[in-house]
Amino acid sequence: MPEVAILGAGQGGCALAADLTLKGHKVNLFNRTKERIGAIERNGGIDISGVAGDGKGLPGLLTTEISRAIDGVETIFVPVPAYGQRFLADACAPHLRAGQRLILTPGYGGTIELYKIFKAKMISGIIVAETVTLPYGCRFLGPASVTINNFFVPKIAALPSRDNGDIVDNVKTYVDVRGGTNVLEVAIRNPNLIIHPPPVLLNLGCLERNEGIFNVYDEGMSPSVLKCMEALDREVMSLTSAIGGKPIRIEDLYEEFGCGLVYRMDLSSEKKGKEWLFQERFITEDIPYGLVFLESLCEKLRVSCPVTSALINVADSIRSTNYRKEGRNLQNLGIHVESRDQLVRFVEQGN
């Protein structure tokens, strides 16, 4: 089996590392800090449970040295939040070799940032790609234990999109994926755009009163909140059409993933609010790297997005920050185009 590197030992990285190891792949697992690597070493591997079965996967290499992790590896998965992608791109850039593939799982448009970084550093021959979401719905049970609740079959696209065929064939060696139109379609179809900001922002009172213990996937998705999510979803679908992709409702997107509406949990009354702790990245990732990117594309392509803009404004006010300034948008990415055709040509051809 080909050797694969995984950069980041969060819940997605650990799930991927354990699953691929148990399937017979040789895996190198990198993490920036020693704590997680140390926990896995002490445990003798990563315990895995859930739909992937029960087992313990011990990657062939556990390291905090990124040069060792990617040396001689053909495929490099980067399952980290969007705000960690630039750090890893800069860290691995001096050690990359032509022919390697970097897969952001998910990307939120991170392929554009990586493409620009590597081009500025005059690194050529690297294929960068991103998926809509992780290939798993997973959660940590402990520092070296992860459970996989669902398998997803996400879309994937490369930048430039002429490499889509190559990247689909390569990644299918490891996890199930399907080809997307281009990285713009894949970036904006991340379901977290829809299922995180609206229920979190519209339920902040309950979240704060309960010190973050509040299940936004069940208790938070009241009829009014679902209407807001549906309105946001319509904006995403309009933009998807504008960039040449296939618009799909979030309900149908989850059917495409092959898992159904897992984000709307059916918890019994005695369990409500007791099994879910608010995750900060639902704001710090999904708004500056998700909604801000979505809004910048809508503005460029003249697609109306009042709900998107309103959610960003609310997040700015409660956090006393400017997510448009610090987040990911066309201006911050250095993408200066005047028309839809120029934008699509960039993601298709890389220039």
Image: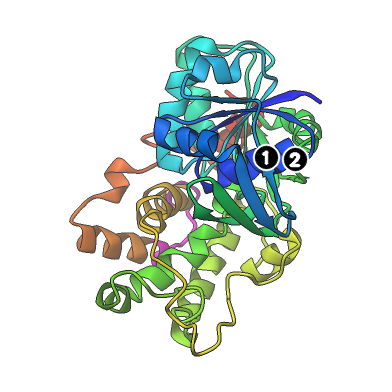
Tag 2: amino acid: Leu
Which residue is under mark 2? Answer: 22
Q: Residue at x 41, y 58 (%)?
A: 282
Disc number placed over residue 340 in the picture, else none = none
Q: Residue at x 38, y 65 (%)?
A: 278
Residue 57 tag number: 1
In the rendering, at what x and y percent does residue 259 appear? 72, 65
How many residues crowd mark 1 within 10 Å: few (<14), some (14–19), many (20+)? many
Query: Does residue 307 belong to the magenta stretch?
Result: yes
Residue 142 can be seen in this image: yes
- Image check: 322 left or right of 307? left
Q: Could you tell me which quadrant the N terminus lies in?
A: top right
Is 238 rendered above or below residue 212?
above
Visible residue check, residue 119: no
Earlier residue among tags 1 and 2: 2
Locate the C terminus and report the quarter of the image it occupies: top right
What sort of colour scheme is used for the picture? Answer: rainbow
- Amino acid carrying label 1: it is Gly
Instruction: Using the image, determine if residue 1 lies above or below residue 185.
Output: above
Tag 1 near tag 2, CB within 8 Å: yes
- Comparing 297 with 29, the one in front is 29
Q: Which residues are magenta?
A: 299-308
Q: Secondary structure at mark 2?
A: helix
Residue 297, given in percent of the width and then of the height, sits at: 48, 48
Residue appearing at x 51%, y 64% in the figure: 194
Seen at 40% across and 40% down, the residue is: 83
**Is disc 2 surrounded by few (<14), some (14 to 19) or many (20+) residues within 10 Å?**
some
| Residue 98 in picture, x, y percent from top left | 65, 11
Q: How many marks?
A: 2
> For this view, does 14 lie left or right of residue 312?
right
